[in-house]
């Protein structure tokens, strides 16, 4: 069933095929998918909550075209109408491990069984218990993390349509900030208005809370949550938010000056904003991801010391559910797996700098898409300092 899902059946069937190919490269006979974003990728299923004591997920076998959904029985109506699958294993909290293990035994799912261990839900103790139950039945359990993530790192044409729509959504919201922000509004109110504009344009809730930071401690609050402090004239304000469409994320960060120009922040951004052009000129299809970081660091450090740089880098973007939108490959190629610049690869790109003495941040983030002809920057908004009158 695909009623109400963002893609037709053939898109999901092609994703299964590609994952089974990846399973072959990793010598996996069976893959138990537990990561919520990967479940969304393969079935379209999305929930506001994933119980830590229930192995919500799905199973793919290398020798079958079938996908078997796994969920607790209270989701039976939800999943049966909002997910694409062939068969299902339903369980309660009390018998979850027993029911999943029995299904593996009855279906002959043995050999090398990959289990996604890097998952926000379910909890690690339950995953270990489930692995022990499968091993007791003769399976050779190995880490199956990143097989699905590897496949979905390269987007299909239909996925890229969602990415481009998400980019339009976040551009509309951040572009509206000069009309929204006034001294006296709190960071929380600005964040709420950003989210409201995105909803008006068809956007969804981002997988990380919208970040708005302003004031004399803004330099120290990267990853800080919006607070109750009212924004004041003279503040430097930092905004980091994702536009989201069908759970595809496009990240955008910009720096603003409230009421009056800030020369120090402007000078930093005027220089660092050009690192994007250097990356575009240097990177080609097939290059290792870290080519981009080496070029960016060289450009930024020509003028700014390392003690002013919070981070130069980025990570893969795609389908994401709370608590984060961060993919498993990073531009420095030092995360969970290395990767190359392939057409359809989507990543954010960050130049985050600060000046403690002046009490400012001067930061921006872009989302980059590799096309057959090179890197495309998805936002149309200037990444230099914007003064809000």
Image (cartoon, rainbow, N blue to C red):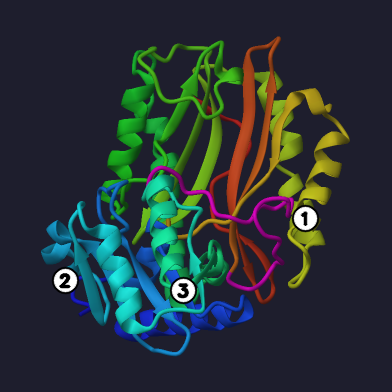
Is residue 165 in sight in this rendering? no
Density class for disc 2 (Cα within 10 Å; few <14, some 14-19, many ≥20) is some
Which structural element holds mark 2?
helix
Is residue 284 toward the left or the right of residue 230 in the image? right
Report the number of discs. Answer: 3
Q: Which residues are magenta?
A: 322-344
Density class for disc 1 (Cα within 10 Å; few <14, some 14-19, many ≥20) is many
According to the picture, the residue beneath numbered tag 1 turns out to be: 290
Which structural element holds mark 3?
loop
Q: Position of residue 274 (x, y in %)?
A: 75, 45
What mark, if any, has residue 158 been given in the picture? Answer: none
According to the picture, the residue beneath numbered tag 2 turns out to be: 80
What residue is shown at x 77% (from left), y 49% (from top)? 293
Q: First in sequence, mark 2 or 3: give its number.
A: 2
Between label 1 and label 3, give the one nearer the viewer.
3
Let me know if residue 254 is in the magenta part. Answer: no
Let me know if residue 343 is in the magenta part. Answer: yes
What residue is shown at x 69% (from left), y 33% (from top)? 269
According to the picture, the residue beneath numbered tag 3 turns out to be: 138
Is residue 274 in sight in this rendering? yes
Q: First in sequence, mark 1 or 2: give its number.
A: 2
């Amino acid at each position: 069933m695909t009623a109400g899902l963002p893609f037709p059946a053939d898109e999901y069937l092609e994703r299964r095929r590609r994952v089974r190919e990846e399973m072959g490269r990793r010598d996996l006979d069976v893959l138990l998918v537990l990561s919520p974003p990967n479940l969304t990728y393969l079935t379209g299923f999305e929930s506001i909550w994933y119980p830590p004591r229930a192995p919500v997920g799905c199973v793919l076998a290398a020798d079958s075209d079938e996908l078997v959904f796994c969920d607790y029985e209270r989701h039976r109506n939800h999943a049966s109408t909002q997910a694409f699958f062939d068969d299902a294993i339903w369980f309660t909290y009390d018998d979850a491990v027993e029911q999943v293990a029995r299904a593996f035994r009855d279906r002959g799912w043995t050999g090398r069984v990959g289990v996604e261990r890097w998952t926000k839900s379910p909890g690690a103790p339950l995953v270990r218990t489930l692995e022990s139950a499968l091993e007791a039945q003769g399976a050779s359990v190995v880490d199956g993390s990143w097989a699905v993530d590897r496949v979905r790192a390269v987007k299909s044409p239909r996925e890229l349509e969602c990415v481009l729509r998400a980019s339009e959504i976040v551009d509309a919201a951040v572009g509206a900030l000069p009309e929204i922000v006034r001294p006296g509004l709190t960071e929380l109110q600005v964040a709420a208005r950003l989210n409201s504009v995105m909803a008006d344009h068809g956007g969804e809730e981002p997988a990380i809370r919208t970040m708005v930071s302003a004031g004399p401690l803004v330099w120290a609050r990267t990853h800080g949550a919006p607070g109750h402090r009212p924004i004041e004239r003279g503040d430097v304000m930092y905004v980091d938010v994702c536009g989201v469409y069908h759970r595809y994320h496009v990240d955008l960060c910009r720096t603003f000056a409230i009421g009056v120009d800030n020369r120090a922040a402007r000078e930093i951004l005027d220089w660092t904003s050009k690192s994007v052009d250097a990356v575009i000129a240097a990177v080609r299809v097939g290059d290792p991801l870290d080519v981009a970081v080496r070029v960016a660091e060289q450009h930024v450090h020509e003028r700014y010391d390392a003690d002013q740089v919070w981070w130069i880098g980025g990570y893969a973007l795609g389908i994401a559910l709370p608590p984060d939108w961060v993919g498993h490959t990073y531009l420095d190629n030092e995360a969970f797996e290395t990767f190359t610049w392939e057409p359809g690869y989507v990543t954010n790109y960050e130049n985050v700098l600060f000046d403690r003495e002046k009490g400012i941040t001067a930061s921006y983030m872009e989302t980059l898409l590799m096309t057959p002809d090179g890197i495309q920057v998805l936002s149309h908004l200037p990444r230099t300092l914007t003064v809000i009158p």
